[in-house]
Amino acid sequence: MLAHLVRRLLINAAVFLLISVGVFLLVRAAPGDPVLMMVNPEHLASGGPAFVAAKRAELGLDQPVLVRYGIWLREALSGDLGYSFVSRRPVAEVLGERMGPTVLLMSTALAIGLALAVAAGTLAATRRNTAIDYATTVAGLGTISVPSFFLGIAAIYLFSLKLGWVPSSGMSTPGDGGGADILAHLVLPSAILGLSIAGPFTRYVRAGLLAELGADYVRTAEAKGAGPGRVLTRHALRNALVPLITVVMIYIPQLLAGAVALEQVFAWPGMGQLAVSSIGQLDHPVVIGFAMFVAVLVLVCNLAADLLNAVADPRIGLS
Amino acid sequence: MTGAVASPAARRFLRNRMAPAGAVFLAAVGVLALAAPLVAGHDPNAVDLTAFREPPSAAHLLGTDSSGRDVFARLVHAGRVSLLVGLLSSLAAVALGTLLGALAGMFGGPLDAVVMRAADVVLSFPSLVVIVVLAGVLGPSAAMLVLVFAACNWPTACRVVRGLTLSLREREYVQAARAFGAGRLTVIGRHVLPAVLPQVAVVGTLLVAQMILLEAVLSFLGLGVRPPRASWGNMLTDAQNLTLIQTMPWLWLPPGLAIALTVLAVNFVGDGLRDAVDPKGARG
Amino acid sequence: MTPLLVVDDLAVEFPMEGGVLRAVDGVSLEVGQGEILGVVGESGSGKSVTAMSVLGLVRPPGRVVRGSVRFDGEDLLALPARRLRRIRGRRIAMIFQDPMTALNPVVPVGAQIAEAIRLHQPRLGRAAVRARVLELLASVGIADPADRYGRHPHEYSGGMRQRALIAMALANEPDLLIADEPTTALDVTLQSQVLGLLDTARRETGAAAVLITHDLGVIAELADRVAVMYAGRVVEHGEVHQIFTTPRHPYTRGLLSSRPGLASATGELVPIPGSPPDLLAPPPGCAFEPRCALGAGRAACRTKRPEPVAAAGGHLSACHFPGEPA
C-alpha cells in the first residue's frame, strides 16, 4: 500500500514537472517582455531602463533556457507567481482572494449533485427496468446535454427576472453580505453546477448499487432478518458509495471547469471569472497562475483519490 | 449478407426509442446546416443598424441581434460551424486514441505503460481549462479548439481500443496471421482496426456531444469561434446582460435550445449505438 | 408430533430470455424437531433455490408459483414481509456456500454478528450484545475473539469466515438451521472440522437442520433422513440407512455406485454420464429418462411423469419401476 502511494506520488511529481515545462514554454510564447511579468510594476516604473536591465540579469533572463526554467520553477514553487499587469498586485494574492467564493460554489454544487445522484441512482437501481429507471437515465442524459451556461441564463430569466425569487448575479448585495444574502446568491449557480454533475454520478451510483444488491452478503443480511431499508442503507448503498469517493475526487477539476462558465454567467467573484476577465485584459501572469493552480489541483485530487480509497475500503489496506 | 449480419445490432438500435428519434433530429439539423445559404433568407453577417434587436416578425423569423443581423440566418449558419468543429475534433481525438491504443495493445511493454499512464494523466485535466489558458495566452481560434480537444480527449478511445487489441491479439486468426509472417503493424491495419470500429464509433459519437458543448461554452466566453462568424455559443455571448436576457429572449433562447437539443440527440444516438454494439453492457 | 418444517408441492420459476425456467417443480420435504435432513443432488437440481424459498429469499424475477412452506404451523409464503423478517435469523438461520462473499467486506465481522442479534433483540444493551458476540466467536473456535471482533472479513481466512458465519447463524439460537453447501468452498482438511462444529452447535441448541450438499459422504455421516433431488424434483426421500442400503431410484443408485469408496465418507460425488435436462424445455416424461438404463425404450418413462410412491418405512421414490435392477 505504502509502496503504491509512493509510486503514485513520484508519478504525480513527474507529471507536475512536465506540466511546469509546458507552462514555462507558454510563458515564453506569451507576447510581452517577461520582465514585465515577473517584477513588481511599481519598482519597474520608478527604476528606468537601467533597473530593467539589472533585473533582467538578476532574474537570469540572459541565462540559457534550462537555467531560466529552473529559476522560474523555484519562484513558482515558493508561491511567487509574478505580478498582475492590471491590478499590479502579486498574482498569488489576486488568485487567493478569489479562491474562497469558488470553493464555496464548488462544494455546495458537489453536495447538491451528490445528493441528487444518490437519490436518483438508488431509485433507479431499486426500481430497475421500470419507468422510473428509464426516466432517470433520460434525465441524466439531459443534464449532461444542456450547457450549464445556457441553463444559467434561463434560470436568471425565470427565477430572478420573472419571478424575483433570488438575485441574478454577484455573491452578495452591497451593504448586506450576511449569510442569508450569500445563500440567496448561491442557490442558482450551485444548483445548476450540481445538476451538471448529477447525471454521470447517478450512473455510477446506479451501477454500483446494482452490483452490490446482487452480492452474496446482501442475501446474508436479508437472511439475518434485516428489512429492505436497512439492507440498502447499512449494507448495499454504503459499499456502493466507497468507489464513488474516488470518482468524486477525480471529478473535482471538471467541476472547476464548469464553475468557470457559471461564474461568468452569474458574475460570481471566483477564480473562473477572474481567469476569463484576465484573458480579456491580456493579463497573462494571472492566467498562467491560474493554470498552475489547476495543475496542482488536478494532481492533489488524484493523490487524494488514492488515499481516500485506501482509507475507505479496508480491503485495499491489504494489497 | 451485410444486412443480415448487421440486423441484430440495428434492431437493438431501433428498439431503443430515443436513439432513432435522436438520429432523425440530427439528420434534420444536418440538412438545415448544409442548406444554410438556401434556407437562411438573409446574409448572417449583414449588419442592419436600422433593424436592431427587433422581435421575431415575418421579415425576421427569430428577430435580429444587437447589430441588426438576422438571428435565424445566424442560427442555421452557426449550426455548420458547431457541427463541423464537433465532428472534426471528435474524429481527430478518436483517430489519435485508436492509433495509440492499438499500438499500446499490440506492442505492450514500456510503450503500453507510457501510453496508458499518459492517458490517465491527460484525462484528469479538464479540456475547458486547458483551452481557456492556451486561448488566453495565445489568442483563440477554431483550429486550436480542434487540436486541443483532440489532445485532451484521445484517452477514452485509446483505453477501449487497447482493451480490444489485447483480446484480439490472442485470437487464433490473428496468431495465425502472425505465424505467417505478418508484422504487428499489418495486423493492426488488417485485423485490429476493422474489429474495433464499432466501439470506436460509440466513443466518437459521445465525444461529438462533448465537443459541441465545449465549443459552445468557449465561444460563449469569447475564447472559441470569434465573431463575426456565428457559432451557437458566441450567439449567447450577448446574453450576459440582464436587460437583454429579460426583454429579448429571442436572442438567447434559440441558440441555447439548438445546442441543448443537438447535444441531447447526439447523446441519445451514442447511447443507442452503445447498446447496439455491446448488448451485455447495455443496462446493468 | 407435527414436523417443524413442511414444504409441500413447491414450484419456483425464473423467467429467462428463451422461456420460463422451472428450477423447483413440485418439491415436498419434511424436517422434524432436532432432526437433520440431508438434501443431495447435482448443481442445478434446485437444492439451493428450495432453501432460498423457505426464507422468501428468491430474488426477482424468480418467484414461487405454487406450494406452501409451513414452519411451526405458519405458512411462510403467505406471511407479510415484516413477520417473515422476524423469523429470518431468529427462528430459521441460514449458512451460505461461499464464506468469501457472504460477509460484507467493509463491515467488521463482529459488527455483522452483532447486527444479527440486535435485529431481533433490540433492547439488549451494547455491552451485552458485544459479550454475546465474543461468546459466539469463542464457541465456534475462533481464537482471541476480542481482537477478532473488530477485524474485517479480508483479515479472516476462509475457514474462519465460515466459522464466523456459523456463529452469526447461531446468534439467536434458531430452531432450524439451513446450511447450503457449507463446506464446498473450503479446503478438504477444513471441511470435516467445520461440519463437526456445525453438528456440535446444533446438538447443543437442539436445532433441526437442512444440510444441502452434493457430497454423499457428508450425508452418510450427519443426516437422519435424505432427500435426493434431480431436475427440480425430489426423486427419492427416506431414512439415511434406507437410501444407502436399499436405494429405489436409478438416479440414487447411480450416485451411490459412482462412489465405491463411500465408506471412507470423503470425496466428492462423481456425476453420472450425460447431463441434466434443459429446465427451459424439460422432457415430458421422467426427467432422468435420457440418462437412465432402466427407462430406455419404455413408453411410460418417456411420456408420463412419475409421482412419488411410498415403499416400506415411508421410503418414497418417484420412478415408474422403483427398485428394479438396471
Image (cartoon, rainbow, N blue to C red):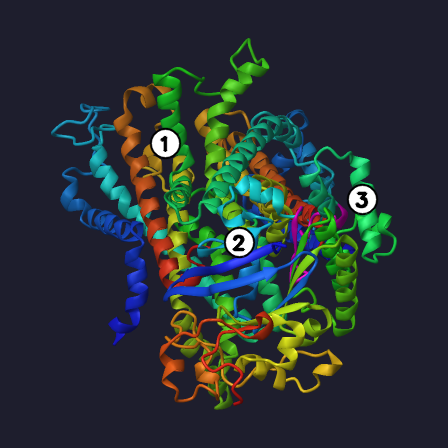
Question: Label 1 sits on what residue type?
Answer: Thr
Same chain under badges 1 and 3? The reply is no
What is the magenta range? Answer: C90-110
Same chain under badges 2 and 1? The reply is no
Task: Please tell me whether mark 1 sits on a helix, a strand or a loop.
Answer: loop
The one of C136 and A173 positioned closer to us in this rendering: C136
How crowded is the residue under tag 2: few (<14 C-alpha within 10 Å), some, or many (20+)?
A: many
* Quadrant occupied by the N terminus of chain B: bottom left
Q: Which residue is mark 3?
A: C132
Q: Answer whether residue C157 is visible to the viewer in this image.
A: no
Question: Label 2 sits on what residue type?
Answer: Val
Looking at this view, name the residue that lies furthest to the left. Answer: B58
Q: Residue at x 54, y 58 (%)?
A: C7
Q: Answer whether residue B223 is visible to the viewer in this image.
A: yes
Q: Is residue C116 left or right of residue A112?
A: right
The one of C97 and B79 positioned closer to us in this rendering: C97
* Subunit ID for the residue under disc 3: C
Q: Is residue A141 left or right of residue B73?
A: right
Residue A106 position within the rendered picture, expressed as x and y whole percent measured from the top left: 56, 33
Q: Which residue is mark 2?
A: C69
Q: Point out which mark residue B237 bears.
A: 1
Q: Is residue A34 left or right of residue B141?
A: right
In three-dimensional space, the C-alpha distance between marks 2 and 1, rounded to whole angstroms, equals 70 Å
In three-dimensional space, the C-alpha distance between marks 1 and 3, rounded to whole angstroms, equals 69 Å
How crowded is the residue under tag 1: few (<14 C-alpha within 10 Å), some, or many (20+)?
A: many
Task: Please tell me whether mark 3 sits on a helix, a strand or a loop.
Answer: helix
Q: Nearer the viewer, mark 2 or mark 1?
A: 2
Question: Label 3 sits on what residue type?
Answer: Arg
